[in-house]
Amino acid sequence: MTSIDRLTNLCPPPPTAPSTDWPSIEQSLGMTLPTDYKQIADTYGPGAFCSFIHLYHPHATTPWTSITGSMPSTIRTQLQHDRDSGTYPVPHDLRHLFVMGVTDNGEYLFWVTEPANAPEKWTITANEARGPQWYTYNGGLTDFLTAVLSGQETVPCFPDGLLTQGVSFTPTPPTTIDTGPQPPTSTTADTNDIRAWARANGYDVPDRGRMPVAIVDAWKKARNQ
């Protein structure tokens, strides 16, 4: 049984997922992506595992969760600032970190891209949201997800009750077009997208619950909505 088979047996994917022109995506990124990531993206599409772990995807509905969006460089800049200011130590060479996922609490998932020309050997690391802790998994993304979702691997900065409601994958709803006035706190985006944008732009946002109106309004203005 392959790694992707073990993952899909544990966490069934949706019936369909969008296809991706991977050569074009890799050309735009300037690097070859791990095969298992591409298998996950092709099998599940954009969405969240256990309503918590969001992998960046070429077909994400916003640039804040897109694998080709601005977040990888934005997060690398933030980490460099943290290192330079002595805020939080980073136990990896920043040149070899590429963010490819985020949790609902604001932890980021990275590939440790060493060796750069051997993506099948890349490992996974995650940082604590607003804290100094880092976790590293000595394996690829599919095996990491399978280990975490099966309970075989515990990520210290993930919540203890991650698997309380069972293992699931929830596809991201497609972006819809507004047809009329909306309440101030209404948005068609996934709340996690707004959290990711807000944190990348220096806002202090809650881990759960309704987003503050001011932050939602700022997010809309940034998107010219």
Image (cartoon, helix red, strand yellow):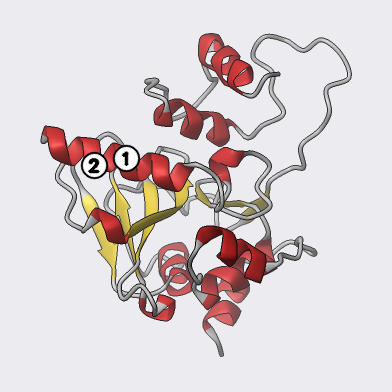
Spot occupied by residue 102 in the image (x, y as percentages of width and height): 45, 46
Spot occupied by residue 221 in the image (x, y as percentages of width and height): 61, 16
**Amino acid type at image mark 2:** Gln
Q: Name the element at disc 2.
A: helix
Q: Which residue is mark 2?
A: 80
Q: Is residue 131 visible?
A: no
Quadrant for residue 135, please give it: bottom left
Callout 1 touching callout 2 (CB < 8 Å): yes
Q: Is residue 38 above or below residue 154?
A: below
User: What distance separates the C-alpha of mark 1 from that of mark 2?
Assistant: 5 Å
- Give the left or right position of residue 196, taking residue 63 as reference: left
Q: Residue at 60% of width from left, 81% of height from top? A: 5
Q: Quadrant of the C terminus?
A: top right
Task: Decide which of 190, 202 is in the foreground and name it.
Answer: 202
Spot occupied by residue 75 in the image (x, y as percentages of width and height): 37, 42
Q: Is residue 57 visible?
A: yes
Q: Residue at 20% of width from left, 58% of height from top? A: 92
* Label 1: how many Cα within 10 Å (few below 14, some 14–19, many 20+): some
* Label 2: how many Cα within 10 Å (few below 14, some 14–19, many 20+): some
Q: Which residue is mark 1?
A: 77
Q: Quadrant of the N terminus?
A: bottom right
- Give the left or right position of residue 57, taking residue 156 as reference: right
**Amino acid type at image mark 1:** Thr
Quadrant for residue 62, please give it: top right
Task: Decide which of 37, 186 is in the foreground and name it.
Answer: 37
Residue 170 shows which numbered tag? none
Q: Is residue 181 above or below residue 62?
A: above
Q: Name the element at disc 1.
A: helix
